[in-house]
Structure formats: C-alpha cells, structure tokens
Amino acid sequence: MSDPATLLAVRDLRTEFRTDDGLVRAVDGVSFALPTGRTFALVGESGCGKSVTAHSILRLIPNPPGRIVAGRIELEGQDILALPERRMRRLRGGRIAMIFQEPQSCLNPVFTCGRQIGESLRLHRKLTGRAARQAAIDLLARVGIPDPARRYGEYPHQLSGGMKQRVMIAMALAGRPQLLIADEPTTALDVTIQAQILELLRAIQAQDNLTVLLITHDLAVVAETAHQVAVMYAGKIVELAATPSVLSSPLHPYTQGLLRSVPRLGHGADRLYAIPGNVPNPLSFPPGCRFHPRCRLGRDDATCRTVGPPLREVAGGHWCACWKCPGFEAGLETDPAGGIRGKETGIRGFLD
Amino acid sequence: MPAFLIRRLLMALVTLASVMLLTFLLFGLTAGDVSAQFLPAQATRGQRQEWLRKHKLDLPLILNFNRQVTLTDRTSGRGDFIVQDEPGSSAASALGLEPGLTEGQGAAQVTRTLGSQGASWLDARSPLRAIAADRPWADRAIKGTPPRPAVTFTFHDGSRLTLDLSPLTARAGAATLAGGQATVGDLLALINNHPDNRGRLDAGVSGLSAAGAFNSQFFWHLRNTITFEGESFKYQLKLTDIIAERARYSLALTVPSLALGWLLAMTAASLVAYYRGGLVDRLGVLLCVVGMCVPILVYMIVGQSVTLELAPRAALGVTPWTNIYVPVAIAVAAGLGGAVRFYRTIMLNEVRQDYVRTALAKGAPLPHVLFAHVLKNCMLPILTSLVASVPFLILGSLVIEQFFGIPGLGSLVRTSVTDRDAPIMAAITFLTAAVYIVGLLVTDVLYALFDPRIRLR
Amino acid sequence: MTALSPTTPDDLAAPRGRGLWADAARRLRRDRSAMLCLGVILLYIGVAVGAAAFLGGWNESYDYARANEDPSWDFWLGTDNFGRSTFQELLLGAKVSLTVALLTNLIAVPLGIALGALAGYYGGVLDDLIVWLLATLAAVPEMIRLIALRFAFSTGPLFGFIDMSGVGGLCLALAVTSWIGTCRYVRAETMKIRQLDYVLAARAIGTSGPGILARHVLPNVVHIGIINFSLGMVGAIMAEVVLTYLGLGLTGQPSWGQMIAHSQAKVVVGQWRQLAAATTAIFFLVLALNILGDRLRDALDPRLKNA
Ligand SMILES: Nc1ncnc2c1ncn2[C@@H]1O[C@H](COP(=O)(O)OP(=O)(O)O)[C@@H](O)[C@H]1O
Ligand code: SF4
Ligand SMILES: [Mg+2]
C-alpha cells in the first residue's frame, strides 16, 4: 500500500494562555501530519496539551485568555489559520468535525437531540424541515441508536452517557466530514460502553474513509485503533511513529514509562509501574528537557538539564526527542509534518 | 410533577401565613391606642371608643374570652332602639352606652353591649366598675340640683322606657357609676325587674362561644389581610379602594421602566458578553460599576434639575400623563449598571459551558450560538430575577414616587409611615409578599416549561 | 492555580487549610487594586474617626453673615444656608455612613454565618425553622422590610426599654434584611461540606458536632462572610441615603444621606455643592468596596473566579 496523501498537517503549532498567574505555553511547537483515511493517535498525560492542540485545529481556543501565536495548520495544503472567520465556520462541522470528552455537558440541555443534529444539517447540507428530520433519524440509526424516531424528539438528559456520545458522533457525521477529531471520546464512559463506541468509530472510519485524530491517554485504545501515534509531554511531541514500533520498541524514556504503567494480562506478578514525580507546572516548565526531573536516565545529566532535545527522525518514520535515545546523534531533524521546517515558514522568526 | 406542584403550593401557603403573622407582629402589636392621632383633640371618650371599635382595636389581641353585658330589644326583630340621656345627665356614656341610634345590626336578636371593652371574668358578682366608666354621671357644669341619672330607651315599636340609675349610685353614695360598690348583678336586676319594663328590654351577660373566641385583633387582622376589607386609619376608606386607585400610578411608572430596563440591560449584556474580554466588555463593565456607585437619589436630583431646565412642567407630578417618562427614564438609568452586570455574569457563566464549544465546533455563527443556545439556557436565572422585581411592579419605586410626586402605592407607604397608618402598611406588605410568592410559584412552573430536565423531578 | 490544572473534585474538596488562606493573602497583597481599595477604605475610616474626635459642634455653628458662600480658604467647599462649613459637614458625615455600614454588617454577617452553618450542618427541624424564617423575610420586598422595621421600631422603645430610634435601631433594621443572603449561601455551602470525605471521617472518629463546625465548617465558609461584608457595606451606605430621604434615617447629626436628601430643593436654586460633595464621597467609598469585594471573591473563592 502506498503512503496515503496528507490530509492535515500541523506545523510548529504554538498556543498560549495568558492567565493571572502568568503565561501558559500549553502547546509549544507541535508538528505532525494526518494521512488520509488513517487514525492518528495523540497520547499523553492529562494536561499535556492534547485538547488545546485539537481546539487549535478548529480555532476554538477561547480568546482571551488563549491565542495561537505561531504555526501553520494545513488542510490539503491550505493554511486554515489564515482563513477568514466566515470560511473557517464552514470548515467547522463541515470538513472537520469534532467530538468531545464529556457527552454530559457537551450537548445543549434545553434542545432536543434531533434539533441539535438538525442544526448541523442546516448549516452544512442546507437541509431543513422533513428532509432534515429524516436525515437526522438516519444518522441516529447509523450510530446505532435504537428507536431513532423516538430519540429524535428526546432531550439529552433522557439518554444514557453512551447514547449521548452516539448522538455527538451523529452530529459530527451530519456535515459529512473528511477529518474527525475525537478528544478522549470514551474517557467519561463505562468500560463496556467504551469498547462499543470505539468499535462504532472504527466502523464509520472504514465506511467513509474518514481521517481520525484520536486523542486519548489510554495506550490500550491506541493499540487497537491507531495507525500512527504521537506521544506528547508538557506541550511538546516527544515521540512519533507507527503504532507497532512505538508499542514494541519505544525509544523515549517517557513512552517507556507510559507503556510500563499499562496493566497487561499475564504479567500479574509485576507491580504496576508509575512514572515517578508529577506532571510539571505549565507556568514554569523545567529547563532543558522538560522530562528530566522524572527521567531515570537524564535526571543528573548536564545536557538533559540545560538543553532541550529537538525532535529527530532516528529511524525511518520514527521520531524521538531524547538525547539518550539510540541513534539520536545520527538522527535527522526532519519535520514529522513533512515538507519545510517551521523555521523557514517565517512565523517562528516573527516571534523569536 | 403534580406532587411537586402540590408541595410547592403548600410551601407558598405556609409562607403566606407566616407573612400574615409577621405583619401582625410588626403592625398589629405595636400599634397600641393610636386613636388620639386620628381623632380631633376634643373628641369624647365615646368617640374614641367608637373609633377603636370600628378598627377592632378594642378587642383582645389573640383570642377573645371576654363577656359583655348585653341589652336586647325584644319588641322587634330589627334593632334600632334609641338611647337618650336625661337632660343634663351623662348616665348613658357613664355606662359605656353611646347615646343615639344604634347601627342596624340586622340580626333577629339585636343587642347593644355595655362597656366596649369586655372582660374575661365578667359575671353578676363583678363590680360595676368592670363595665362602667369612671366619670361623673352628671354634668358639673349645670348649677343647682344635679339632674337625675337616668337613661331613656325608645324601642322599635315606638314605646319608651326610662331607667333611673340612682339606686346604683345612691347605694354607694358615689358620684360615678364605677366608683361604688354596685355590681353588674344589681344593674341587671334594676333593668329586668323594672316595673315599666314588661319584658321589652332584656339585660344579661353574654355567654362564651367558640366563634366568639376568634373575635380578636389577630383574627380580624387575618381576615382583613386576606380580603383587604380593613379600613385605613386616616382616610376612612376601604383598603381595596385606596390600593386600586393608587396602583394605577405605580403601574404606569413601573411597567414601562421594568420593560424598558430589561430590554436595554439584556441588549447591553449580550453585547458585552459577545465582546467578552475585549475593549467593549471592559468599558461596559467599568461603566456599570461606576453607575452602581452613585446613589439613586443623585440620579433623581440631577435628572429633575435637567428636566427643569429643558421642560419645567415635566419635572413634577403626573399631569399631563406624559410626565411619567421622566421618572421612568431615571429609574431605567439608575438600575442599568447593576442589571447589565448581573445579566453579563449569567451569560458569561453560560458561555463557558461545554455545549457552547460544541455548537461552535458545528460551525454555527457566534450570534446564533449566543442568542439561540445560550439565551435559552439563561432563561432560568433571568426569569428568577424578573420575578424578584415583581413586587417593585406593584409598589413602584418608593423613592421615585415620593420624589416626583406620583401618587402611587410607594408614596402611600411613605405617608402611611408618617401617619402611622398600620392597616395600610400591613395590607401593602402582605400584597407585595403575596405577589412575590405567587410569582415564585409561577416561575417554578415556567422552569418546568423552559428546562426539560426539571420535568422529571 | 485553579485555571491551570484541570480542576478535579478533589481540589474542590480540599480543606481550606492554612495554605489556601496564605495563598489568598499573598494574591491579595500582590493585587494592587485590592490594596488600593483597602487603603481608600481605611482612609475613610481614619477621616471618620478623626472628624468625630476633632470637629464637633458643626450643628450649632450658625453664622448667617457667611451663609451660602463660595469656596474660600476658610471654607473649602463653601457654606450652607446657615453659614456652616460644607467641608466640615462632609468630614463629619463619614461617621454616620461608616458606622451604619460597619455595624450593620457586624450584626448581619455573623448572624448569617451562624444560622446558615447551624441549619446546613444539623438539618432537621432547626433547618426547617431557619429556612422558614428566611422564606418569610425574603417574601417581603427589601424596602418594605426596612420601612416596616423602622415603623415598628419608631413606636417606642422595644420591649419597653431598648431604644430603637437611633443608629442601633437603624443598623438592626438593615441587618435584619441583609443577613438573608449570607445565611442562604453559607447554608448551601455547609450542606456540601458536610458530605465531604474528611468531614465524614472526622465524624466517624467521633468528633463532636460543634468540633466539626468549628474546625471544618467555619474555616470553609468565613470567606463568604468576608465577601458579603464588603458588598453588604455598599448596601448599607446606599440604604442610609434612601432612608434618610424618606425621613426614616438618622437625624440630629451631619450625614451624607442628609446632604444628598436635602439637595432636591437646593439644586433647583443652584446650590449643588453639598450634593456633589456627598456623592463624590460615597462614590469613591462604594467603588473601593465594590472592587475589593470582587477581588476578595476572586482570591477567596476560586470557583467563582471570572464569574
Ligand atoms: N482556557 C484556559 N485557560 C488557561 N489555561 C488553559 C486553558 N485551557 C487549557 N489550559 C492549559 O493548557 C494546558 C493543556 O491543557 P489540555 O490541552 O486541556 O490538556 P489535555 O492534554 O489533558 O487535554 C493545561 O496545562 C491547561 O492548564
Ligand atoms: S533528554 Fe534526557 S532527560 Fe530528556 S528524556 Fe531523554 S534522557 Fe530523559
Ligand atoms: Mg483534554
């Protein structure tokens, strides 16, 4: 199979929040590319900037306090950060749709499910009246909601958590998107429901040739669904590769720690591992490698403590940002988003 | 839902009852003998008694176990026997009987009571002092032989009976009826056994009855509160009439100012929320805070003097009717700062909710998200705040009415305080509370309409 | 901190220990506008105390020869119809406003906290009783509540011997109307706190009700009191003006309320200095109190931040 074309490329994205307590660099130079029709996973501990990355793609960062200060986000080569708001609105829910972590609070409590799906249909497919109603009911049926005609007129509080997430998915599909961003779609759900929702997403992706950006902190989910995975730590991508290589031969100490902390069947004798220390305070990231206070290799290393490692391609299609990872010296500073480096886009220079 | 409504209704009734209790405590108990303030200085004791009786202030506070001496005209079913003093004597009023015609009480048994203040321990052995007044039965002013202390009754059939009370005083050798040793029994015997009486006038001590026990200030207060049947101390008018007349002016002031104020505040708050965090927002909030820091009276004084410059005739009073727009404008301006800030807080709180992000992620334009999604969710707190302003609707702004000489309920309250007109105060307090409580009840029902989540509760 | 780390229920449940208070104090001390407001309020209190101590006798300082003068070195803000110094009146007026504002809240806030915490913690009949009282009082519109109380108090001494016509009675009337908000809020908060794990744990090891109230509940609700104190002072100052205009305020001593209330007739004939002076004085005091209240809320109640 030849490499699919890139649908969306994120280059050197930087998003900041100005809070009362100081500047939060929530996303600090993130680059990756989403191949068409594949699932790309973004993993990392809570607070590392996954959601901010996703919201940046849709330009949903609340301003103030947030602002995308640099970078390019290219949808089929076009920089959507430069689009006027009116055209951006057509993308949102149209070519790019998103589902969120909390189905409880993400649906408007005072509108029926049908009406909320209908809104997307009206905005992106110009459907109204009976046609919209039929399309919405079809969508509800497609995401596996039993008795969709009845559910159409119900309010969110009348549905279970899993049902609500299905409604969210139906809403996302209403605009016939190319790219679906799923921000921890299963985190708030029961384990059995999680599996069902993931299965649904997988089925839809296969049917529609959807590109999926799956955000999760659960490596088990990644193993089952993603073709490629990027590991984020403290606002930066620290490792990026095809899923099998990351899972079988993780190169970054943080990825290794994450993998060790996943409970596995048949390894019951092992004590469950936890990465020592805490997620760093986003107001003041540690100097040098941001992981060094928690890193068993670099804790006392002079380089690690002072100079942050760049992201380098240490093997074909395997990027890593760690001074101590094998092959780092010889690695190339290529861009996982493909094409030219952020430096040459000129945006970075404008900020530095 | 019905269970919920019934519970709410019961709660509302309890609160209403409590408010009645409160108004009684505040205005009933503290009133005391206020007759002196509402009657001319030369009013007789009888007139005062009559006044107290009319306003039920002669009754016991909570429960009435009092008994009274009653006189019954047996000659007819209709009751208008006439009581007259012998010329020069004041025996009737000394007994606590008002000379003149009785009010037609319409009952088959027509009675007049002796001594308006009944006493709980009254019986035949009680001293006459218990019902009679401590005042001379004869006018000192008349020189010569003191007149006979006698009372003449003219019954309904036209016949007369003259009672000479001197046995009661003579036996005690006292100049007043209350001063001697005579008992109530002596009085009853004197009347009933009088040779001329022949059963026409029947005197007796009233019995105790369950219904009579509630003939007290408290229960009259309750009744008058619910029916607004009481009478103002000052105006000699039924409260219903006074309130109906005054409320017109208050409503003319408050309905436009509430509607206009709400509309302006909502628009401004939406604008400010739309530009949240930006310059418009900051400037708006600043203006609101500044507006809130100026006392309302200052708005009025400045507003009035400006009006005096521009259109002097519009600065005071309500003739012509269009004058009402000056106070309306001032009321709106004075309340705007607080209202905008309040609605802005509600809206921003709602704008931060997750479903807003979902709607935006769908590609819905921001104005649509604000006015369709957010506004409907804001309806609950907004409704509550509107209900909270309902009492203002009836009452008008006290200060504004006072200031601009608008004869509404607000200025009625104001004058009632100086006049110590307790019935009006009680009635208006209850009225506003009742409207508020009913408003809350209605809000709860409306909540159920606006917020589908509440339906299941 | 709060906006940065995703807020978890645990954060909210954490006892408001010394750390949080210290944190709040640090934030406030760093907050220039809050400190400025506090300074302004202290300045007002200082002026009130100083004026009361050194500037007596204004009431009788008639001097008809110098009536209605414009500002001069002798009279910085001119004189009134009786030749009395408006500037002196302004300084003396601070006393009434501040006494009313402070005393009212010294009654209302502790009352609200105490009843709210008791109702919220013990529940049952006590709660029903307090809620009933709240509902009854709240059903009567605020202005009527105030007027009714002033009406009742003015009949004569309460219980025959407590004189209610002076500043005490005014503050009591204001307090009776303003404790309601604090009480409601504290009650709701206490009911939440009662359910928290550490309180349940304390109960499980046998800590007494008063012990838990003192150690766990009160420290977690006083901040509501502090915030409401600041905002309640605003209400009291404004109410004093309105009540004075309605003839239900304090008489016999200079007050900003009187300076404003008596201006209706004066402004018409061009005497606006008293109005302007008192309005300005009230404006800055109330502005400082409003801002301080908001800042206190931000610092002490992170959940309400930006609200
Ligand atoms: N609205 C905001 N205001 C301030 N900081 C924010 C905001 N949203 C996110 N952040 C900060 O950005 C960082 C990344 O958050 P997020 O992307 O939500 O993490 P996660 O990886 O768990 O999705 C966090 O440290 C958070 O504090
Ligand atoms: S660069 Fe150093 S500190 Fe960072 S992960 Fe690698 S070894 Fe650890
Ligand atoms: Mg997230």
Image (cartoon, rainbow, N blue to C red):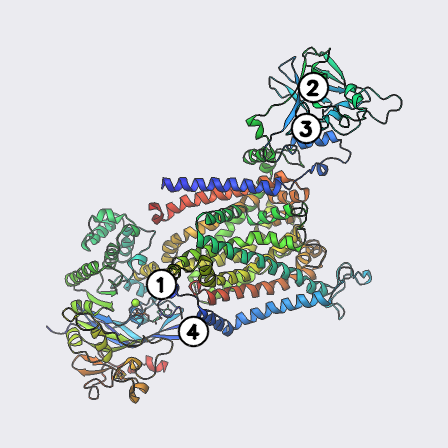
**Can I make out residue C156 in this image?**
yes
The kind of secondary structure element at disc 2 is: helix
**Which amino acid type corresponds to the residue marked 4 in the rendered image?**
Asp
Point out which mark residue B116 bears.
Answer: 3
Check chain identity for marks 4 and 3: say if they share one: no
Would you say A288 lies left or right of B322 here?
left
Check chain identity for marks 4 and 1: say if they share one: no
Whole-angstrom CA distance, mark 4 to mark 2, is 93 Å
**Which amino acid type corresponds to the residue marked 1 in the rendered image?**
Pro
- Quadrant showing the N terminus of chain C: bottom left
| Residue assigned mark 1 | C9
Point out which mark residue A21 bears.
Answer: 4
The kind of secondary structure element at disc 4 is: loop
The kind of secondary structure element at disc 1 is: helix
The furthest residue to the left: A1
**Chain of the residue on which disc 1 is drawn:** C
Would you say B100 lies left or right of B211 here?
right
Q: Residue at x 38, y 56 (%)?
A: B374
Between label 2 and label 1, give the one nearer the viewer.
Answer: 2
